Amino acid sequence: MSDLLAAHRALYEAVESGDVDLMASLWVSAPDTTCTHPGTTPLRGTPAILRSWTALMATSGYVQFFLTDVQSTLLDPVTAVVTCTENILSGQGLDDAESFAGGRVASTSVLLRRRGRWQFHSRHASPLIDFDADLEED
């Protein structure tokens, strides 16, 4: 399972470092791959998915992911599901160069073992809403 979790973590390392080649190596090349970024409609097909990641990395300033609640399930010898909470620290879109913003996202990924290594086949990320904080404000 350590190679599965290493492949999963590599996606975040690719985004943090803006490594388009690493990102491309992490995805199965197929027309039925899917990726849903928070707040967007699903993208289908590896070319569209890689374009979206490339655009995201090109327009992002500083971004760092702190993964929590990571759980992995091996469905069979070649299919696994990894879920986690992405705690995101970003400097994008802020006026003050010393400022950072944060967010939390729930992510579910399906990875396939191909030629001895794990690759993403599907990923869905959705923003988390802190209902307790909303109730306290009211």
Image (tube, rainbow, N blue to C red):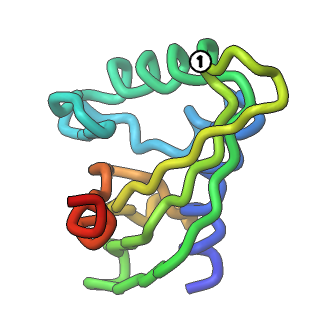
Q: Looking at the image, is 87 positioned above or below residue 96? A: below
Q: Is residue 80 left or right of residue 45?
A: right
Residue 130 appears in the picture as rendered? yes
Q: Where is residue 88 in the image (x, y as percent from the top left)?
A: 57, 50
Residue extending farthest to the right is: 98
Q: Looking at the image, is 98 positioned above or below residue 109? A: above
Quadrant occupied by the C terminus: bottom left
Q: Is residue 125 left or right of residue 60?
A: left
Image point (31%, 50%), residue name = 127
Q: Toward the viewer: 90 or 134? A: 134
Quadrant occupied by the N terminus: bottom right
Q: Toward the viewer: 110 or 106? A: 106
Q: Report which residue position mark 1 lands on.
A: 93
Residue extending farthest to the front is: 138
Q: Toward the viewer: 103 or 28? A: 103
Displayed quadrant of residue 52: top left
Element assignment for label 1? loop
Kind of residue at badge 1: Gly
Q: In this view, does 88 lie to the left or right of 13?
A: left
Image point (64%, 82%), residue name = 2
Image point (47%, 54%), residue name = 119
Q: Position of residue 50 (x, y in %)?
A: 45, 24
Residue 122 appears in the picture as rendered? no
Q: Where is residue 9 in the image (x, y as percent from the top left)?
A: 62, 61
Image point (24%, 40%), residue name = 34
Q: Position of residue 86 (x, y in %)?
A: 49, 59
Q: Toward the viewer: 110 or 83? A: 83
Q: How crowded is mark 1: few (under 14 residues within 10 Å), some or many (20 or more)?
A: few
Displayed quadrant of residue 82: bottom left
Q: In this view, does 49 lie to the left or right of 119?
A: left
Q: How many labels does the image show?
A: 1
